[in-house]
Image (spheres, rainbow, N blue to C red):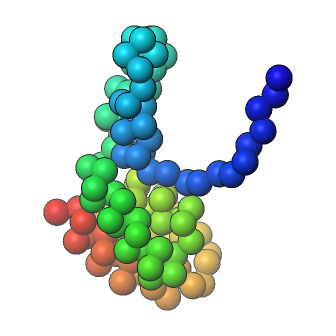
Amino acid sequence: MARKIISQVPITTAEAKELIEKLDEKLKADSKIQTLIQTLTLITKLPIDKAIELKKALVSEGIPERTATQLVDLLPASDTEFIAIAGSDPTLLTKKEKIMELIRKYKL
């Protein structure tokens, strides 16, 4: 029987890592799950509490949740990296300084 997707919510790599780590030990023993955990450990840049806090701060600044999630996961360090994520969205480009300030605050 096919599964029906009820909703989709963008989550950060830190949130994904926490969800995977909560799996039953038998499931975590699978080599694919082990590889996933190792990969998430390597690419996750912030602990879960800081990732969630930064995402909420970005969303409260009017950043769409999907874009906020990308910003939290990638933590752009330069204007070029920020523009690569923001694209040509004029609303994000006008808030660039505030967004970069928030990111720098949580990176420390």
Q: Quadrant of the C terminus?
A: bottom left
User: Which residue ends up furthest to the right in the rendered image?
Assistant: 1
Q: Position of residue 71 (x, y in %)?
A: 44, 62
Position of 35 with respect to 51 (left or right) is right
Front residue of 90 and 26: 26
Front residue of 99 and 22: 22
The residue that appears at 42% across and 73% down in the rendered structure is 58
Front residue of 24 and 106: 24
Q: Quadrant of residue 66?
A: bottom right
Q: Position of residue 21 (x, y in %)?
A: 36, 30
The residue that appears at 22% across and 71% down in the rendered structure is 105
The correct choice, above or below, for 97 with respect to 35 in the image is below
Q: Quadrant of residue 18?
A: top left
Q: Quadrant of the N terminus?
A: top right
The residue that appears at 81% across and 28% down in the rendered structure is 2
The correct choice, above or below, for 16 with respect to 79 in the image is above
The residue that appears at 31% across and 69% down in the rendered structure is 103
Q: Is residue 79 visible?
A: no
Position of 8 with respect to 95 (left or right) is right
Position of 10 with respect to 108 (left or right) is right
Number of marks drawn: 0
The correct choice, above or below, for 102 with respect to 76 in the image is below
Q: Quadrant of residue 9?
A: bottom right
Q: Position of residue 54 (x, y in %)?
A: 34, 66
